[in-house]
Image (cartoon, rainbow, N blue to C red):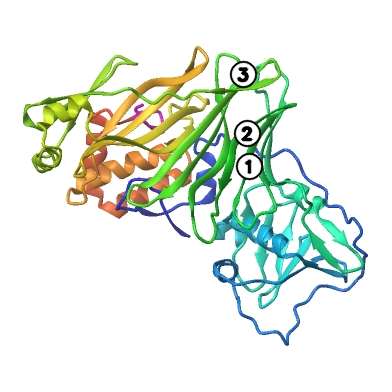
Amino acid sequence: MLIQWRSSLPKFILTVTLSLSLLASCGKIEEEPYNKPVVETNSLQKDSSTARVDPSKKLLFKTFEELAAANDEHTLEIRKKGYDKAYKASDILIYTILDMLQKSEKLDTVAIDNPGFDYNKYDYSLEFAGANQILLSVEDNTFYMKEDGNIYKLWGDSSAFWKSLSIDEAEYAIDLPDEIQDSMKKAYRHDADGDGTADDVVLSFYKARTKDSNGQLKLKVGLSEVNVEDEIGWVSEPYHIMYDTPTVEFIPSNKGSIIAISYSWMTNGVGMTGEIKAYEYRDKKLRELKVDLPDMDFRYEKGGKVKIGFPQINKELTAVSSKEDVESVEKDSKLQIEKVLKDKEGFYPHIYRYICKDFNGDGKAELCSQSLIRFQTPSTMSLGYLYTIYKYDNGGIIPESVKLLPPYDEKDKMRMIKNDVVENLFSLGFLDFAKIEDKELWSNMESQYGKSDFEKAITELFEEGYIKKNNDKIFLNL
């Protein structure tokens, strides 16, 4: 099948052939949810008949995307599989269910075409007026609309949500409870404090009775619970407000693991904006850790060179600015470039993403951020993309190493190839040529750019110290 690289660098997307097994094999950190929820029938009365949509009603929405995109007042009946009785949902419940369905991810067609996928496995039929049935499996966190052809995976386990609904048997009505509720959650088993015993780690999205996408994001380990975000709202299908939805990552520390919650928002102009919250679990309590961004000092040298100092790690890197950018910044700021850099006038470091991957092949995850380093006065002088590896130290998360990649230039083919190779290795963690899928991926990249240019770019990336090889694996040299 054909998919696109999810590139966070603007203006260019590399199209390649990539299988789901490759995505699963490269630097996978997230553990599979351990819980398999059991759906209860509550007071629903069983009948052997199956749910059907009235053929006399006009079909207005042929796909889930059309239903979700419609700015209409919907009506909805909910029917449990194998039960004749359907319950009319309240307006607030309709909105909440649509919001839940939009917090999902469309599955790859490889999974959809897999004969092992059971289209008859579902727990609830969601019957929106003017649309085909949506069949939802609580156990598998999946749903699809009949005749649509797409299958969607919910952000998390929704079993608690369905159990919490209030049923009025006399009116054949169903509604939300009055209190804020656990809408969806991601659950894991992981030894968070290093005592040798796996802990229950749960990231939950709590939704109130409101007609918006907002709710609370909470992290719970054992009996200790913290608010990650007091108010957060997103949709990911059919339109992406988030690039990466909230995810739990476990970063090894000197005792147990740091629990990181990362996500990134789609942002006009710069592509995306990454956020992260980090916690440690000690003495049966969660404590938030500060994640320090790299401190930077700037010094201008002749020839357009900009020296960037990183005092936290005692390192200095060199960027190159164009003559046109320097002149524009000086004109806008009415200052010499030396003073602009020294005073950090208009300095604008922008975090794209935080990712936890095994970047060096040791089997352990490292936290790495990708950010844009630029000055804006309002003219923009971009100095490149900064990749930062972090480490746990003295109760906080601090920078450990940095690597600067020159700015993207669509007029420079070598620069395009180099930046996209680095960007996609960052997203995947590493490539393992012992795996057929990774060999095919490398071959497809080569075909995309042309064998000669691609090999030249790769050779230069090795010589410049951006990538390295260890046996059959290629890594970023972070």
**Residue 318 visible from this viewpoint:** yes
**Residue 171, percent across and down?**
88, 69
Callout 1 amino acid: Gln
Number of residues whose C-alpha sits closer than 10 Å to that of mark 3, classed few (under 14), some (14–19) or many (20 or more): some
Secondary element type, mark 2: strand
**Residue 197, percent across and down?**
73, 20
Residue lying at the far top of the rendered structure: 394
Identify which residue is drawn at 56% across, 71% down: 70
**Residue 432 visible from this viewpoint:** no
Spatial separation of the CA atoms under disc 1 and disc 3: 27 Å
N-term-proximal mark, 3 vs 2: 2
Tell me, for residue 216, which label it has, or none. 1
Of 409 and 58, the residue lying toward us: 58
Q: Which residue is mark 3?
A: 256
Look at discs 1 and 3 and give the one toward the viewer. 1
Secondary element type, mark 1: strand
Tell me, for residue 227, which label it has, or none. 2
Look at discs 3 and 2 and give the one toward the viewer. 2
Spatial separation of the CA atoms under disc 3 and disc 2: 21 Å
Q: Is residue 170 above or below residue 395?
A: below
**Residue 213, percent across and down?**
59, 53
Magenta-colored span: 468-478
- Left or right: 334 as drawn, with respect to 422: left
**Residue 153, percent across and down?**
63, 54
Identify which residue is drawn at 73% across, 38% down: 34
Spatial separation of the CA atoms under disc 2 and disc 1: 7 Å
